[in-house]
Structure formats: C-alpha cells, structure tokens
Image: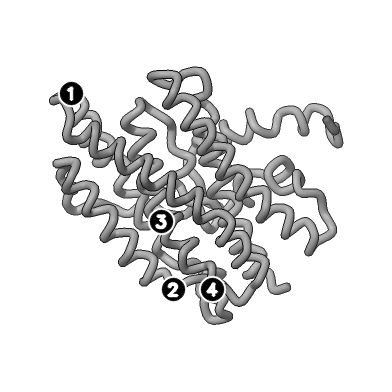
Amino acid sequence: MQQEIKDFILMMADNSMILGHRLGEWCGHGPVLEQDIALTNIALDIIGEARNYYAYLAELEGKKEDDYPMLRNERLFKNVLLVEQSNGNWGDTMMRQFMFDCWHYFHLEQMTNSRDERLGAIAKKSIKEANYHLSFSSKWVIRLGDGTEESHQKMQNALDSLLPYFDEFFIPSDFESYCYNEGINPDLNIVKTKAKTKFNEVIDLATLSLPQNIFTKKGGKSGIHSEHLGFILTEMQYLQRAYPGVTW
C-alpha cells in the first residue's frame, strides 16, 4: 500500500484518538451527570473508530494496534490542530466538538463510497454515531448561544478563538490529494460545502456572529502541532514509555 494512503488512515485515526482523549478528560467533571456520561460515551465512540483505523494499519504493516497511538512522538501525528486544543469551559468544548462533528459526519458520508472497502466499511459503521454526535453538539451550541447573556458571551468567545482552526479540515494535504485521485478520500470541496452549510445554519440559530478576517491555523496534518499535543502524549503514553511492552 502506498505511504500516502497510510498517512490518510493515520490522519483519520489521530483526529479521533486525540479528540477522544480530550473528551475523556471531562469524565467526572461534566456540569451534570447526564452530560458527563454523554460526553464520555462520545469519547468512547470516536476512540473506537480510531482503533478500527489503527487495526487496519497494524494488519498492513505487521505491527500492533497500540504502536500507533502509544509509541509515536508528536511530529508523527497527523491530526488537525483543532482536536488538541484545551477543553476550556463547557462552551469551549461544545464549540470544538461541533466544528469537528460538522467535518466528521459529512466526511464519513462521502467516505462510505471509498474504493478502499475497509475504509468504506469503517465509515458506514461510524456514521450513525457521528450523526448523533452532530445532533448533540448542535443542540448545545444553540442552547448556550441563544441562552443567557453570560452563556451567549462564552459561546461567542469560543467561536472567536476556535474558528481559525476549522478550515484546516478542508485544506487538502498531499496525501489527501493523492487518495482523492485514487478514489479513496472524498472530495473535500463537497465535504466543505455541506459542513459549512450545517455550521452556518447552527451559528445563526445560536445568534452568534462569525468573526471577520480570521487567520487560518494549520500544520497538524504535516506534523507541526501546538504545544498542547506534547502534554497530551506525555499523559497518554506514560505507561507504555515507563514499562515498554506492558500488557493488561
């Protein structure tokens, strides 16, 4: 298999793995028990999706599934910058989740037609959960944005700070362009159109204002990350680093 295809699979896996870890940090700290459990379940859903991608690579390369999330340094991770950003408050987390879900759902929708049957199957398995995730985060963005003066301001602050990271999803890397030409990766222009339509619809309902003249932040797909990822990996990889080869 071409390296570009492996890089694409890693990007899909790393996006879900790193965001899943971030969401897991909320476990036991949610605003109410129901939402605490809901967010933990979303984390489990997307980490499960990440495992499917890692398992596919492990079969192709004769490695172990855990080698990919646990034994690489940050420059080898291909996740976008958005998913590694700090949780902040509940509004920050919901806005970050909503942006991810807008890309994730419509990307999976297009990827169900991938020429790679394994990736198509993962997309078909994951899209039902992704649909629920998008509904969940959309409702929270609307509820908080169109809520009290305080909740509205917090959501506006979250939108202002996170929007520069959103477009990285839709800027094709070299490996994504290769995979698109091979019929493996979706057309990101189609994904962008659908995701932005949903995004703008929810932002309007939330009575939020899109900031103007933003500077798009990118680099994650090529391994250039924010300082946050190193701290995430320090925690996530500690056991394997301290006790190499340990099993449960």
Would you call the spot at circle 1 few (<14 residues within 10 Å), some (14-19), or many (20 or more)? Answer: few
Q: Does the image show residue 73?
A: yes
Residue 146, given in percent of the width and then of the height, sits at: 17, 35
Q: CA distance from mark 4 to mark 2?
A: 11 Å
Q: Secondary structure at mark 3?
A: helix
Q: Label 4 amino acid? A: Asn
Q: Which quadrant of the figure has residue 175?
A: bottom right
Point 38% across, 19% down: residue? 31
Q: Which mark lies nearer to you, 4 or 2? A: 4
Which badge, 1 or 4, comes first in the chain's sequence?
A: 4
Q: Which numbered disc covers residue 113? A: 4
Q: CA distance from mark 4 to mark 3?
A: 17 Å
Residue 115, given in percent of the width and then of the height, sits at: 61, 77
Which badge, 3 or 1, comes first in the chain's sequence?
A: 3
Give 164 or 117, whichever is nearer the viewer. 117
Q: Secondary structure at mark 4?
A: loop
Q: Which numbered disc covers residue 226? A: none
Point 55% across, 54% down: residue? 126
Q: Which mark lies nearer to you, 4 or 3? A: 4
Q: Which residue is mark 1?
A: 150
Q: Label 3 amino acid? A: Trp
Q: CA distance from mark 3 to mark 1?
A: 28 Å
